[in-house]
Amino acid sequence: MVITIIYEEFLFFHELSRDWIDRKVVYSTLLLYRRQLVLRYLSISSSVLTSKKVIKMSRPLHRGVPAIRVTSSSNGLLDSQVKEQTEKEELDRNQSSHRSRHRLTILLLKSSLVVIVILALTGSFWWTLSISTSSRGHIFHSSRRLQEQLVSDLWDIGELSFGTSRMKEIEFCPGELENYIPCFNVSENLDSGFSDGNEYDRVCRQRSRQNCLVLPPMNYKIPLRWPTGRDIIWVANVKITGQEVFTSGSLTKRMMMLEEEQISFRSASLMFDGVEDYSHQIAEMIGLRNESNFIQAGIRTILDIGCGYGSFGAHLFSEQILTICIANYESSGSQVQLTLERGLPAMIGSFSSKQLPHPSLSFDLLHCARCGIDWDKNDGSFLIEVDRVLRPGGYFVWTSPLINVQSSLRNKEKQKRWNFVRDFAENLCWELMSQQDETVVWKKTSKKTCYNSRISGSGPSICSKVQDVEFPYYRPLQNCIGGMHSRRWVPIEERATWPSRSNLNPSELALYGLHLDELNEDTANYRIIVRNYWSLLSPLIFSDHPKRPGDEDPSPPYNMLRNVLDMNARYGGLNAALLEARKSVWVMNVVPTTGPKYLPLILDRGYFGVLHDWCEAFPTYPRTYDMVHAEGLLSLESSQHWRCTMLDIFTEIDRMLRPEGWIIIRDAALLIDSARVLTRRLKWEARVIEIESNNDERLLICQKPFFKRQPS
């Protein structure tokens, strides 16, 4: 059979090299042939692997056949023994012959792959040479791309043909990597010359990735269901000890209370007179009655810099305010890790030397309460970055002992630093709204004319169009004012308030080249998709099983779902559908750097999102998401010639996913088949579901098992 296929492939390329008259026909034929070739070899490989599996399963049955006890004469016993010996020898010969045939089949399959690759490249080469000069340049790039894709597909088929030797399960990472985050290596950064806090920067080197499965800590437990899990977490789940809690500063001790195996976050515990009074104070300084009026003032999304453990955002969540925490990478006692463990939005981010992976004009309010950033350093570039991501008319809230007037008067150095920040903010066209105790509130201007009315040389200049990049991806900090060339310069007071903001009007959609019908269709599709997810997985992850604080976690199928990661968010349709269905989840909308840039659209709808390259590690700690969703991501990466492997992407998903978490992947049938094979190596429990409305797509649903670390 293999020899026949080799002969057929040779004839195909021979005929193709002769018939080059219609390049469109050739191009289409190559596409069709590549798909058929992959399907045929997947079928052969699957049959070989299946036969090998059957052999392995059948051997114990042969070895386990019990001996037959005979009670007749000695001659009968001798005949029986001779018969048994003959049957055993015949069985051994059959097994040996079966194994020989299996080895021969594998050898022929490997050899055929080599021959096919040579014939494919040779035939394509001579075919290209035979094309006329006028046609050759026009189709060269398409031919070369198909040739590269064909070789890539054949390589994937070859991986399958090697059987279990290449399909071994991925090993577990060493115990010291239980909180491992690629791209954050302080010691290596120090060796490379990083200093002044830049050693904590995200640097994705070629050796950053570890293709192993990160195991949870020794006494890890499934987090408590929301909203209980917001206020109580398991100590063993995060990298912080009781000693670190008790020896920390007074602020932290007022935030947290250690109770045996749990950490309890008391509701009135953030700072000073409690988080409720603190947020009420901020509302009054803005000119509002209380924090419940944030929505009416146009405030929906808040970036909380150095958030502590997320209590400010946890309180505002009840007011429909979406607060995302960003903080530096920390080797222990991480703010980001604890915030995510509580089921609150968070990611690792830094103002130290790079721009944030967010578009300009993204947030309604930025908050910094003793966040550890020296805003007067680096020539004010940190404040310029705040201005870039802040919407026109947005607010910057800063709480720091440096602001205390009485303290500053007694300390000349503090007074000098405070004066620099105050004057620099004025040169950024920020209006000083109010100053109370240790808190100050500025409001960014809504009018571009303010920048032209400044005294010449009194502040940072406006970025040129070349400098003003709307989609920065960890670019160096700029010393000029960004966002001025964006068509999204709309004051927050003129935007629709939440939740109407999620439904953009036709003029707003026109900024992204979209029509209202396209967004409505996307919303309707995801409404059906979410309903189908619920029916497929309920009651596995959406159970309303009651559980009180301190109770033992029930065994599956009762799991928690709170943190959701959408790896290819497009317009934010999944987020919109989940909120419309009144599910108490938040979504990290990720827009791949290789795909359409609709991230500003997602942010303008009142959701949170970030730009990311999925060939790099996502800036988060292990075990931080309950569900990962990816629609069309594999097709997107395959169109980029697989800059990284599917295994790289899947091991990163496994790292981010909590034990007993879920993966939902929707993509082309061929890619789903390849992904299904890969799930075995990752030890995921997986099943493929056909989509009735689309025969070319499949749904892959997987669950990550809970592997407990054994005592060493």
Image (tube, rainbow, N blue to C red):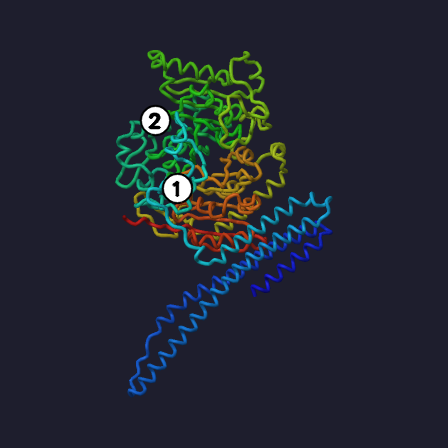
Q: Residues within 10 Å of mark 2 (few under 14, many from 20)?
A: some
Give x and y (percent) for residue 616.
Answer: 47, 39
Give x and y (percent) for residue 482.
Answer: 54, 24
Relative placement, left or right, of 97 versus 570 is left
Q: Vertical placement of 520 versus 16: above or below? A: above
Q: Which residue is nearer to you in this view: 467 or 491?
A: 467
Relative placement, left or right, of 74 versus 354 is left
Whether residue 116 is visible here, answered yes or no, is: yes
Q: Which residue is nearer to you in this view: 57 or 422?
A: 57
What amino acid is labelled 1 in the image? Pro
- Under circle 1, the secondary element is loop
Q: Residues within 10 Å of mark 1 (few under 14, many from 20)?
A: many
Structural distance between the alpha carbons of marks 2 and 1: 29 Å
Q: Vertical placement of 616 versus 416: above or below? A: below
Q: Which residue is mark 1?
A: 622
Q: Could you say which disc has been placed on residue 271 in the image?
A: 2
Is the residue under label 1 in contact with that under label 2 (CB below 8 Å)? Answer: no
Give x and y (percent) for residue 473.
Answer: 51, 33
